[in-house]
Amino acid sequence: MEGLAAVALAIALVGIGFWTLIVRRNLIWKLLGLNVAAGGAILFLVALAHRPGARPPIVGLGPGPSADPLPHALVLTAIVIDFATLALALVYVVFLTEHRHTQDVRRLERDEERGWPQP
Amino acid sequence: MAAALSGILAYLGCGLLGFVRAPRVLSLLALLGGAISFALWAPGFPEVLVGGLPWGIAVAGDPWAMGMWGLGLVLHATILLHTRGRRDAFQPLTTVLIGACLAAALSRDLFNLYVLLDLTSLLALVLIASGRRVRAVWAGLQYLVLAEVGLTLYLFGLGLVYGRLGTLSVTALAGQGPNLSDPALAVGVGLLLAGAAVKTGVFLLGLWLPQAHGQAPTEVSVLLSGIVVKIGVVTLARLSEAFPVGTVLLLLGILTGFGGLAYALWEKDLKVFLGFHTVSQLGYMLIGLGLGAGTGALLYAVAHGLFKGLLFLAAGEAVDRVGRREIAPLAGHLSASVAIGLGVGACAIAGLPPLAGFAAKGLLAHGAPAWARGVFYALGLGTAASFAKLVPLFRPRGPGPVGGLPVLVAAVVAFGLGGTLLVGGLLSRRAWGEAIMVVGLGYGLYLGLRRVRPRLPRWGFDWSVVSLLLASVGVVGLVALGWL
Amino acid sequence: MKALAAVALLGLVALLALGVSGVFPRPAVPSGEDIAAAWGAENVVAAIILGVRLWDTLFEILVYAMTMVGVKLGLRLLRWERPLPPVAETPLLRRSADLLLGPIVVFALYVAVSGHLGPGGGFPAGALLGTALLLLALAKGVERLSAEIHEPTLEWAEYGAIVAILALTGALLLVGRRGSAHLIAANLLIALEVAIGAWVVLHRFASSRGEV
């Protein structure tokens, strides 16, 4: 049952994340939305490892079946990757803010059409 | 196997040490190590699970790996020769990027490919932004975000496929004979396909790619169009090997080819124009994969990497020296070496024999059904027509510095000659005549279309994301509904 | 546009739900305890990350390292226009740094060394060490601390750690060496790499007082 709840939450996170990515005009909000969506995919992998009554995949940690260890390993990698992407993207948002004094996507696009006039 | 993996380790190690000291020497050393390792494993090796059963990462030295290694090493040599003077982080970043591409070419594990696709897109952003121009940073940021959207879908799909079949290795997946009438599996495969397609820059899913490729600094554009895009194609090839998704790839390929072409025909910015042609030529590779003509697609991927690298190198030189980006004002300002490079590249991409494009296109068309040949002819016609715009640029004005151009010119010619000799038996004299005729007709088409100026839709960032998600849903739906 | 976006997202969510509904219940999976034993670990996930799928982890570390390079380069691109305000020195921060620094470092080392036996590993240990350095920087003053740290040595240590991990990967995957000593070494190296990377970035943010 908790597995199902986690999966439903994962799908909801993907939806909410992408919605934020599309609807918000501020770049930082967009990146946060993207990260929430990626979090949804990660949560789904974690939920995938779950089995009823399972214990953590560590030797000698009680009876019962062990949770699937492979998704856990994949998730650790995916988390670092998401963190890295967010960090790098934010740095370049900072760069754009310094040079264009805005984080608004539409204003950036308007500037792009006009050939980047001095702000 | 050990030779290939240690080659990659040496590549990455040299690249990383290059951040601290002697970047140029270490990059040369990496290239040397990579070449030795390639020579050692070149006949190929069968699939091995690195790390052992049951979850090890499958690598194999198959034809795709060999093609991509050759392409990567040639491009790296060119870049090294071209950027002799640079002492900053550019060389080590390039070395690590090529090392990652080499690893991706060997990999036959879906999650390993995910990690490597991500590594290449991060490095691509850092390299695109290294030009310190606001427009390049903006294009690069969009590139990263959209690639990341694709990779999120890919990760979700990977979870679904793993949940159903319990393995991530392409060979093991194919061995289970996956049945796409199972909804979980169909959705998973669709998401994998959509994600990889977004990352690759397939049209509708990736109108941002030409901007990113066009705005990047010269050497970076060469790498992006030359090999980074090809890693996405490798991923799609692996997916088409594991799952029966030929029809979807075929549809995507036709859309990509003609969509990219439509934008390229009327684009005025030289480098963005070349970027649109990267998209249009992806169409050839996807159609090849969709038809099951893996060898033709591989040959075209390598050939495209070489001549598009050459085109971007020459065009970048021209744009950097003259200081104008549009095609028309560049006429009459190019040095001889740049004009020759552009000329050879344009002839190769148009498919003139015996350059690199001819043999690859010939092999693709050789086994194809009649309607697919028609598609190839139409694409070739459009390519020739759009490259006819560059004809005024071929009048050089005095000699100039040469840089890395000769390496790629030689590679394009040699690959073309070798390919033509190899597949020459398959290609009748008719193929030669047809190739020349297509180019001639293309020039005629260019003359006819010169007066037409349609307004093609330009999408902003938000629209790109929406269209990309819609298209992904479409792809997933296509797979899930089983229109295969 | 919002309507189209809603259509796309609803379609996506519906497809995801359709897909997920077919995945559960999952078939039985191997527990991997024999694999953990073969690699000299008790934590099966650690055995996978540092053993069976070390080839992935290698590139994960590279993703992290390249991001740090990108962050460094990206922040160097910025123009600094405003004069930076001095950091307020508070006795509270100084005292708490005195008290906390030792335990944090010890705990980080514990997390790294015991990562193959239980929850833990190189990445969390490195993050802990990085924050310990940040705490030290806030207490001592960023400028003073960064003057005491020799920058080239730091770079050598950062990239040297990754090159050592590359060598270790070769030993584990190509030569076939196994055992818990290798896993501990890998965890410590990863912790070192992550800590230095975190320090480099946090230091840049702290020395610009968050005014980026």
Image: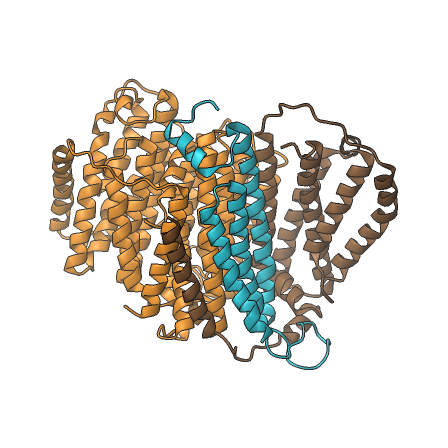
Q: Residue at x 48, y 74 (%)?
A: C23
Front in this rendered view, residue A25 or B370: A25
Q: Is residue C39 left or right of residue C88?
A: left
Q: Residue A112: image x %, image y %? A: 40, 31
Looking at the rendered image, the quarter that the C terminus of chain C falls into is: top right
Rendered shade, chain C: brown
Q: Is residue B429 left or right of residue C76?
A: left
In the rendered image, is residue A30 in sight? yes
| Figure check: B59 above or below A104 | below
Quadrant of residue C136 within the rendered picture:
top right
Which residue ends up furthest to the top in the rendered image? B398
Please, which residue is most extreme toward the bottom here? Answer: A64
Q: Nearer the viewer, residue B345 or B280?
A: B280
Task: Name the one closer to the observer, B33 or C212.
Answer: C212
Q: Indicate the colour of chain A.
A: cyan
Residue B145: x percent and y percent?
A: 47, 46
Measured along the vertical axis of the image, is residue B152 above or below residue B462?
Answer: below
Residue B317, position in %: x, y?
A: 37, 27
Q: Is residue B126 left or right of residue B209?
A: right
Q: Colour of chain B?
A: orange
Give me the residue at 30% from left, 36% from top. B273
Residue B220 place in picture, x, y as percent? 44, 36
* Residue toward you, C176 or C157: C157
Which of the 4 image quarters holds residue B481?
bottom left
User: Residue pushed farthest front?
Assistant: C3
Q: Is residue B473 left or right of residue B94?
A: left
Q: Quadrant of residue B191?
A: bottom left
